[in-house]
Image (tube, rainbow, N blue to C red):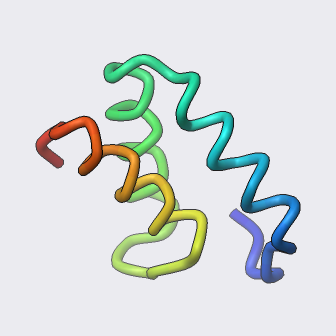
Amino acid sequence: MTTDPWTKDQLDQWTRELAGKTDQELVDQWQRTAAACGDATTPAVEALASEMERRDIDF
């Protein structure tokens, strides 16, 4: 993952992409993100966590 900050447009696009993923795809994305970022919190990671919480997916 890049350390460059995401623009609002990039984050909005990511949020739309997350909304279109299946629950399993979100879990897979979370696992890949956790492996790549560890405990780092970025707006992209927060958007992923928010979508998973919205769907009541345990992570």
Q: Name the quadrant of the N terminus.
A: bottom right
Residue 41 position within the rendered picture, expressed as x and y whole percent measured from the top left: 45, 80
Residue 13 position within the rendered picture, expressed as x and y whole percent measured from the top left: 78, 47
**Residue at (24, 50) in percent of width and height:** 53
Residue 7 position within the rendered picture, expressed as x and y whole percent measured from the top left: 86, 74
Q: Is residue 45 left or right of residue 28?
A: right
Q: Is residue 17 left or right of residue 9?
A: left
**Residue at (82, 71) in percent of width and height:** 8
Quadrant of the rendered structure where residue 46 is? bottom left
Which of these two is toward me, 11 or 30? 11
**Residue at (63, 48) in percent of width and height:** 15
Relative vertical location of residue 19 with respect to residue 54 in this rendering, above or below:
above
Relative vertical location of residue 24 with respect to residue 58 in this rendering, above or below:
above
Quadrant of the rendered structure where residue 38 is? bottom left
**Residue at (82, 81) in percent of width and height:** 4
Which of these two is toward me, 36 or 29? 29
Q: Is residue 3 left or right of residue 54?
A: right
Which of these two is toward me, 36 or 30? 30
